[in-house]
Amino acid sequence: MPNTDSDKASVDVTAVEHSQDADIREQVLIFKAFVVTVQHFFGGFRCLFQGVTDPRHSAYITYPLPTLMTTGVLMFLLRLQARRQVGNLLRGNGPSAAKYQALFGVASCPHGDTLNYLYARSDVAEVQEVVTGMTATLIRRKVLYRHRLLDKYFLVVVDGTGMLSFSERHCPYCMTRTYQGYTFYYHPVLEAKLVTPTGFVFSLMTEFIENPRANPTKQDCELKAFYRLAERLKQRFPRLPICLLLDGLFAGGPTFSICEKYHWKYLIVLQEDDLPFVNEEFALLSQLPPETHLVFRTGVQSEIQQDLRWVNQITYVDSKQNEHSVAVIECLETKPDADKQPKTTRFKWITNFNVTASKVVCLANQGGRLRWKIENEGFNVQKNGGYALEHIFSQDATAGKVFYLLLQIAHLLSQLIERGSLFRKAFPKGVGSAKNIAFRLLEAWRNLRLTLADVQQLLDIRVQIRFAPP
């Protein structure tokens, strides 16, 4: 990648948007989409991290805390994939140094080890609040209102994934698993992500799954983490109308009780071998009244047929003798496969919605079916889309958590940039995949010379940013 450290003049960012130099024009436009998006929604990076306490002695601070936190976000946003790449690609580069000077008042990009030093001493809860606060800001500004289920409920998927794994014990809090005589040490996380039908997947809250000490009698697990996460989520969003989308692991009395207590709705995958009594009642009662059966056609040419059945007010008594009134929805979806032969797939959910003919299609397609977005647009993108979720960015347990949370910030910003009208108007034909956006932004960061006045000109821009489906 070329390094333009020569005495190249800076550019007027407004005039250059119509420049005949396509490379410079593209770099200005993509950098503008990045800076203006952060400024428009969150007031800039300095405001974003103002709630995080700096643990360092003031006499030894070279780089302000927002500079170091932003550099971590940039590492993920630009898909650098390793801490050392911060030094290789962002340090010792004139245009990069100029941007740090303009944005943060520092002479250069910090070293990757400096990031690690700060993160290891940071308060994880404060960094978590930055992530949560960003999604809360989008909710408060009504960016996500049109994506609510039944025009009321925000869809929150809770699911776990692996983050780090080691062949030797990494810290006292490692989870352990023994397979064929080998013991593995790993750190999974449980995520609550707000999802939309258009493909947005924003981290709302993270619960790290870890043991309280080495070799505990019972290890931590997703269910225990869910109970902790649910309590934190209710405390942070006491009045937010939430519909949880969960997999079959959570189908049971404790989850039902939590949702009843917090006044949350839920759509939980119901497997055929889970909750036998509920499945038996549904099998019996769903065949009786015709008003609980609906055939719905969808697809470009109505080639997909959905056979929907539902039953309300099934009484379920859990192991603690608590009684719950639940409903079950079943969807048999038939559509042509790759050989144009009809293939039928069964979907089934247990819910506390009162299901009706007017709601069932929405609950199934705009509710229960969206649970997979946390896997496809969430974890899969973060693992295989250049964010390197499973890479060990630090051996320090606290720093590892901070790196993970900064990754969530980068993923949120990437989605806002890619789907925002500022970027779409600048690149009406697109630039390919999200990785290409990251690559072009990296080129702009390294090659585009901007002065303090140029950057301030961008920060002063007042625009409306709207979003469209992918």
Image (spheres, grey):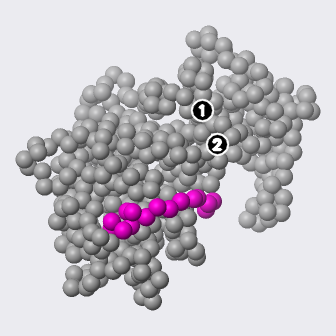
Question: What amino acid is at disc 2?
Answer: Arg
Name the residue tied to disc 2.
Answer: 148
- Seen from the viewer's position, the closer of residues 13 and 88 is 13
Q: Residue furthest left?
A: 59
Crowding around mark 2 (Cα neighbors within 10 Å: few <14, some 14 to 19, many 20+) is some
Query: Is 350 drawn above or below residue 303 in the view shown?
Result: above
Query: Is 273 drawn above or below residue 362 in the view shown?
Result: above
Find the magenta span and give its range. 455-470
What x and y, as percent, mark residue 349? Answer: 69, 35
Mark 2 or mark 1, which is nearer the start of the sequence? 2
Q: Is residue 464 visible?
A: yes
Which residue sits at x=72%, y=46%? 365
Q: Answer whether labels 1 and 2 touch (C-beta < 8 Å).
A: yes
Q: How many circles with numbers are drawn on the protein? A: 2
- Seen from the viewer's position, the closer of residues 35 and 342 is 35
Q: Quadrant of the N terminus?
A: bottom left
Residue 457 drawn in magenta? yes
- Seen from the viewer's position, the closer of residues 458 and 294 is 458
Q: Quadrant of residue 448?
A: bottom left
Q: Main secondary structure of the magenta part?
A: loop
Name the residue tied to disc 1.
Answer: 241
What x and y, as percent, mark residue 75? Answer: 32, 60
Query: Is 411 drawn above or below residue 431 in the view shown?
Result: above
| Image mark for residue 120 | none
Q: Quadrant of the C terminus?
A: bottom right
Query: Is 362 drawn above or below residue 89 in the view shown?
Result: above
Which residue sits at x=42%, y=69%? 32
Which residue sits at x=43%, y=46%? 134
What x and y, as percent, mark residue 86? Answer: 25, 64
- Seen from the viewer's position, the closer of residues 279 and 145 is 145
Residue 240 drawn in magenta? no
